[in-house]
Image (tube, helix red, strand yellow):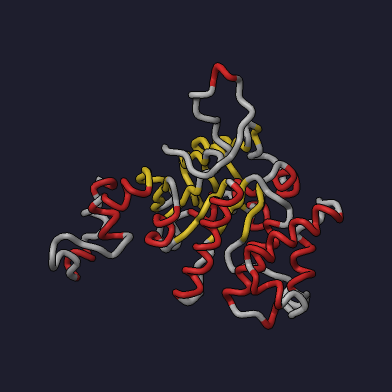
Amino acid sequence: MREGGTVTFMTPTIATSAAPPPALAIHNIQVVYGGAIEAVRDVSLEVRPGQIVALLGSNGAGKSTVLKAVSGVLDAEDGVIEKGSILLNGRAVEKDPAPAIVRQGMVQVPEGRRLFQTLTVDENLITGAHLQSAAKLAQARDFVFSLFPRLAEMRQTTAGYLSGGEQQMVAIGRALMSQPKILALDEPSLGLAPLVVSEIFRCIQTLRETTGLTILLVEQNASRALAIADYAYIMENGRVVMDGTSEQLRRNADVREFYLGLSSQPGRTSMKDVKHYKRRKRWLS
């Protein structure tokens, strides 16, 4: 895996050529809901400092479950990590509750944004900075407004009156208020118009390039995600079926057809082909 971003690490001089350890490492986790439904099985992935790593797959593949597991919020849906480990900056967190994981530096932007609809933009941002001093709160808010200038103009607007794209900006801004080391984004493009999606993804890329922030991006829109990610994993039926650099996956024939909507063979995507969709995936054979 190749590195991205510009993060400085305190490493001994004799080890300058060695790659830094993963900021987030998941090893063979299995997640079960309600004691009976296996949603994720034997999933392993790594996110190195300063990288954007994408977790791709169709709806129901298990992507969001992985994100909930690393964020410590499975218990809200009667989900349990049955086996495996999750290391955040080298520390095991698979049994930690969400507040402890946030204190360790990982913050999630949930699917659907989940803002406080009756609070203003400014008040929503403040709720994300409950662990910060007043000085750091002001500094973080200024940074959010520089990243999303539109929010500065709407800071006194009630969140419920914002457009979907503006709400997504507030949700990302609220997460950034805690000055995280790792930002986890769950389906940031969901329900947004193409132009707004472009703006959101441009901001995500800018965020990494200007701050070196480590980002785990869960997304169905493979084309958008691979355009900005350093490395990506593809999930199906609760497991990782393929991984590689974004360039490697973009060149892969199956990924191009099944996830990017491209085909080098005219007529290959007929109804007969769709019927044998799973059989024709080489990684599932």
Q: Nearer the viewer, residue 7 or 48?
A: 7
The quadrant where residue 142 appears: bottom right
- Residue at the far right: name it: 134
Q: Front-most of 54 and 237? A: 54
Label tally:
0
Is residue 182 found left or right of 188 in the rendered image? right
Residue 148 visible here: yes
Quarter of the figure that contains the N terminus: top left
Residue found at x 60% / y 46%: 70
* 170 or 136, nearer to the observer: 136
Q: Position of residue 60 (x, y in %)?
A: 45, 60
Q: Where does the C terminus fall, quadrant-wise?
A: top left
Measured as percent of width and height from the top left, residue 167 is found at 63, 73
Give the residue drawn at x 74%, y 79%. 158
Between residue 202 and residue 30, name the one nearer to us: 202
Q: Is residue 181 above or below residue 127?
A: above
Report the side of 30 relative to 160 (left or right): left
Residue 191 lies, in percent from the top left, at 51, 74
- The residue located at (41%, 51%) in the rendering is 235
Q: Is residue 139 left or right of residue 41?
A: right
Q: Is residue 83 visible?
A: no
Rendered location of residue 55, percent (x, y): 46, 51
Residue pushed farthest left? 266
Residue drawn at 61 percent across, 20 percent down = 12
* Furthest residue in direction bottom, as rendered: 161
